[in-house]
Image (tube, rainbow, N blue to C red):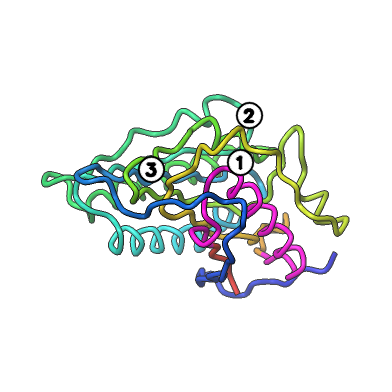
Amino acid sequence: MRHTTVTGAVLLPLTIALAACSGAAPQSSAPVQGKAAHYTYIMDVSLSPATITDPAITRAVERRIGADMKRDAKLGDVFSVFEAGSADAARMVGHTPIVSGYNLRLAAAHAKLVGQLQEIAGRFHDHGGDNATHLTEALEAIQPDCASGRDELTLITDGVEESGTYSAARALALGKPVHLPDPSGRFLAGCHRITFLGFGLTDDGAGHERLLPSGQLAALRQGWLDYLTQAGVRAEDVHFVSAL
């Protein structure tokens, strides 16, 4: 399988123009008055994503998160970090939520969030990563709060689901469509924005990052769109950030 080597370490936004799926129910984008928004971050700690194997790309992710917070977040909003990898329940417990406010401004909240991400990355580099990527299972266990109308979910991952029941890597290698396990319900309805950081950007096992070929990238993107729209997300609210 031929891969395209990524020579730069800076993540560039690859915003996909998405058509709304006919099966997705209309949702209101108006925020609930006075309700804090929840920002949920899920960091893939498996062996494949360059977002954790390459420190330069990890730092680029941190900068992107800071820019997104500056654009969207308000004082009082809550930021929570989780991990996804093996099916171990400890992966889905999450780190201490960060609650912004007058005593913790957004810049300080971002610094605390980066500290949690760096702690995860440090543990990865010290002890190694997981041999599985239970992204859909982690999502359904976490059940992100999307009640305010401004809530956002960020997945720091290459997006390659590798669980006990399904292997997206195998499907991609065989040139087949990606069919992720069906979601348990519309548990992500109301989420304002879902962003993948490092989508399709994998580690080749020799310390070099690579971007999936365009056909595989498209198949993986469609697989996630199918899953997320079934889970209640509007297709136009899903954003993919890759590397060029």
Relative depth, front residue between 13 and 108: 13
Dividing the picture into quarters, in which one does residue 176 lie?
A: bottom right
Left or right relative to 73: residue 21: right
Identify the mark at residue 135; answer none if there is no mark.
1
Q: Position of residue 50 (x, y in %)?
A: 60, 57
Q: Residues within 10 Å of mark 3 (few under 14, many from 20)?
A: some
Mark 2: secondary structure: loop
Along the line of sight, the residue nearer the viewer: 207 or 185: 185
Marks 3 & 1, CB-CB < 8 Å contact: no
Which region of the structure is painted magenta?
210-239
Tell me the SS state at disc 3.
Answer: helix
10 Å neighbourhood of mark 2: few (<14), some, or many (≥20)? some
Q: Would you say 230 lies left or right of 167 here? A: left
Residue type at mark 3? Answer: Gln
Give the total number of marks visible in the rendering: 3
Front tag of 2 and 3: 2
Mark identifier at residue 116: 3
Q: Amino acid at mark 2?
A: Ala
Q: Is residue 11 left or right of residue 72?
A: right
CA separation in Å, label 2 and label 3: 21 Å
Q: Is residue 159 magenta?
A: no
Q: CA distance from mark 3 to mark 1?
A: 19 Å
Of labels 3 and 1, the one closer to you:
1
Instruction: Please state, as top left, top right, bottom left or bottom right, where the C terminus lies in the image.
Output: bottom right
Q: What residue lies at 58% left-to-right and 37% top-to-bottom?
A: 127
**Mark 1 packing: few (<14 Cα in 10 Å), some, or many (20+)?**
many
Residue at point 63%, 61% (across, down): 201
Q: Nearer the viewer, mark 2 or mark 1?
A: 1
Please give the label number shown on residue 87: 2
What residue sits 46% from the left and 60% below the top?
A: 61
Q: Earlier in the sequence, mark 2 or mark 1?
A: 2
